[in-house]
Image (tube, rainbow, N blue to C red):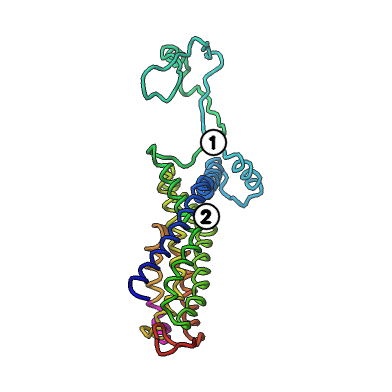
Amino acid sequence: MTFGEHLEELRHCLVRAIICLGVGLAIGLTVANEVVRFVAEPLKSAIVDFNAKRTLALLGYEDFDDPEVQKLLPLITERSLKWQIIYEIPDELQNLTPESIEPVDGEGSSEAARVKPREIVDILRALPAGSDLIPKVQFIRDSTGLSTFKVEESFMIWVKAGLIVGAVVSSPAVFYFLWQFVAAGLHRHERKYVYVYLPVSVTLFVSGVVLAFFLVLHYVLNFLLAFNGSMDVEVEPRLTYYINFVLLLPLGFGLAFQLPLVMLFLQRIGLIETEMYIGSWRIAILVIFILSMLLTPADVTSMIALAIPLMVLYFLGIAMCHFIPRGPGLGSAAYDPS
């Protein structure tokens, strides 16, 4: 094929890949709302669990293994309850009538009606001394959830979720068409490397994503909520920040889990030998902790949760370099079994 024919073939492959990506985007946008709800569920569950335990702690229950606490905890978490102290106005002072309610004038008001200020003043003046007010504890439903500060923020998150889902759904077809163009210029033994290592790479990436989202994210959220609680800071999660956080954590895990293949590739091209991997394992562990710090949010839990699997994968990479037999090198034109 001439250079122009190669360009034409590349154009055809790219057009097909873009069409597949567009179809995937259309599918992704139809399920984007469900995806956002799905990724937001761990945060809502973590907030409910944290508030329930904090409520019990403030009520004097410190041992969460106590059988009495184990009975109360499901009651509070299932109904998303939290407690507050109120000072109830005595019934004899409750003299409001329907005429006491007036509409609210003015733009930008968040309420449709209010009690007439003069009548509220009369009630406050008639109240007994503060020491005579009896405090009461009541439970209210906790409606804490994701919030937005901009009108267009939810729409942009919807589009982002649709793009991500579309890219994932269409990735097999996109890769297939791009691979058709690349494979035409490779020898059979070079194509075999891709056929063997690509499934391993995908498996490692998916394993990292699953570990991060279904296991590590739970402990990270609990740690961050507990840390905010220790500083008496109320958490009002923002949609954009949380979605970016949820995307960053699994993506960092998925990329980091490619470590054994990177080690094998460097060994196969002769840049690093297996003995060097073995002799430098202490330095490698230090580098792993540094990478874990960079690839995860700023908390200790997620860093350690990524560093420990990476250390296991590092020694797995050493085993792969040692036991997988060497074949013809990548780019070797002198060997072609076909």
Give the secondary structure at mark 1. strand
Distance Cα–Cα, label 2 vs label 1: 24 Å
| Place of residue 205 in the rendered image (x, y in percent of width and height, measured from the top left) | 49, 66
Q: Is residue 286 left or right of residue 176?
A: left
Q: Quadrant of the N terminus?
A: bottom left
Task: Identify the residue position indicated by label 2 in the image.
Answer: 218
Front residue of 56 and 318: 318
| Place of residue 293 in the rendered image (x, y in percent of width and height, measured from the top left) | 38, 63
Quick check: 194 above or below 36?
below
The answer, for residue 267, to whether it is visible in the render is no
Quick check: 248 above or below 82?
below
Give the magenta part as a residue range. Answer: 274-283
Residue type of the residue flagged with mark 1:
Trp
Front residue of 221 and 19: 19
Q: Residue furthest left?
A: 3
Q: Residue at x 42, y 71 (%)?
A: 181
The answer, for residue 206, to whether it is visible in the render is yes
Task: Identify the residue position indicated by label 1 in the image.
Answer: 83
| Place of residue 157 in the rendered image (x, y in percent of width and height, measured from the top left) | 43, 46
| Place of residue 214 in the rendered image (x, y in percent of width and height, measured from the top left) | 54, 58
